[in-house]
Amino acid sequence: MFRRDTPQEAQFRNEVRTWLEANLPHALRGRTTRPHPDELMPFYHTLSRKGWIAPHWPKKYGGMGATLNEQIIMAAEMAHVGAPNLPVQGLNHIGPILMEFGNEAQKARHLPPIIEGSLIWAQGYSEPGAGSDLASLSTRAVPQGDHFVVNGQKIWTTWAHHADWIYALVRTDPEAQPRHAGISFLLIDLHSPGIKVRPIKTIAGDDEFAEVFFDNVVVPAENLVGKLNDGWRIANALLGHERIATSNPQFSLMALERIRTMARASGVIADPAFQDRLAAASINVTALSALFSHAVELANSEKSPGPEASIIKIYGSELLQSLNELLIEAAGGFASADKPIATQFGEVDVATPFLQARRVTIYGGSSEIQRNVVARRVLNLPN
């Protein structure tokens, strides 16, 4: 990482590393795809009981209330041990949004189950005709007294086929201009009548995403977060949290370790030209860690990430792709293997993370959209 630990932080790092070594099952380490909930959630529960499941949450909501440096240390140590990717839609997305925009009843009902891991959340943003142009979404929620009636479809919803709840952007005023002015933010129980969920198998061979269909789904009015037709403001705040979370240096640190292992096994580690590229990659990961720490500092100050989130999303996602391209180079003739490669230094999965990394510049807002945000909101360039 990019900084030295104080003695107190070094003690905390050692505690985290020792605890993870003792409590993270070996079967979960180094996984390139997110394990099935039956495998993954027991570790989530163990981490929750330890009090470490939400380092960035305030203690009053059941979080760890960790300092910025403690959060960075935990990310690094999770990467060091090869910890799996936890379901973060609750922890990193809807949880912080409810703390900022939710009412007390919503916080009391939904935050404890996220900490406990008794309920899993999914995100309902993208639609077949509304991805990068999210303001054109067509899923409707018609207010009818004490409830809404929801009809439409969402797609690319991470873990929706395993989730219990979904937070969704819905159109509540089809006549509003501009289009984003008629969008609201709803919490929807995925076990409600009229909902169908269909998993999507990706090019990497996992079923990380799903489609969700809403057919006259009744949603209580109390599940509206914020004001009616004010969902766009909330959505943008949530996207800031999401863009930061997807750029967590844990993923790049794990990719860097795979490159080093594969390069030692293939012998390319002795090539001076490859050493230069590996050194440059290491420097870039350190830079990402510094960017991430700044973003976390903003979040700790209870400031919704703004254009900073777009900058870190561009840098983090494109770095992860370049790291996996370097991994392919390190593997040489073995790069085409569709199964983990056995080496004297341990197994290395090359193809799966390379294929998975193709999508990271798309979800959470494509790189093209992020550059538009930076151009307009940071550089004040004309439309």
Image (tube, grey):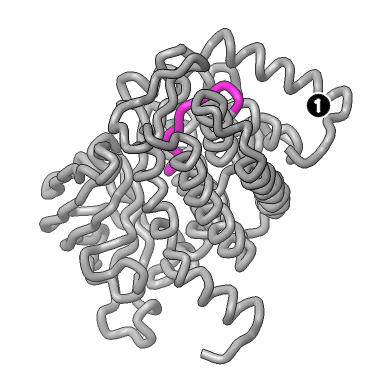
Please report the bounds of the magenta region as a residue range: 80-89
User: Quick one: 86 or 314, which is closer to the camera?
Assistant: 314
Residue at position x 51%, y 56% from top?
Answer: 318
297 in magenta: no
Residue 133 vertical placement versus 68 (above, below): below
- Residue with the most extreme right position: 7
Please name the amino acid that badge 1 sits on: Glu
The image position of residue 368, as x and y in percent, is: 45, 71
Q: Main secondary structure of the magenta part?
A: loop
Tally the numbered discs. 1
Comparing 106 with 197, the one in front is 197
Residue under the point 34% across and 62% down: 169
Q: Which residue lies furthest to the bottom in this view?
A: 382
Residue located 68% across and 43% down the image = 279
296 is higher (above) or lower (below) than 118: below
In the rendered image, which quarter contains the N terminus?
top right
Is residue 41 rendered to the left or right of residue 47? Answer: left
Residue 256 vertical placement versus 168 (above, below): above
SS for dot 1 = helix
**Location of residue 248 by image quarter:** top right
Residue 296 in sight from this viewpoint: no
Q: Position of residue 342 (x, y in %)?
A: 40, 19
Where's residue 372, x and y in %? Answer: 51, 77
Check disc 1 and report the residue beneath it: 9
Left/right of residue 173 with respect to residue 267 in the rendered view = left
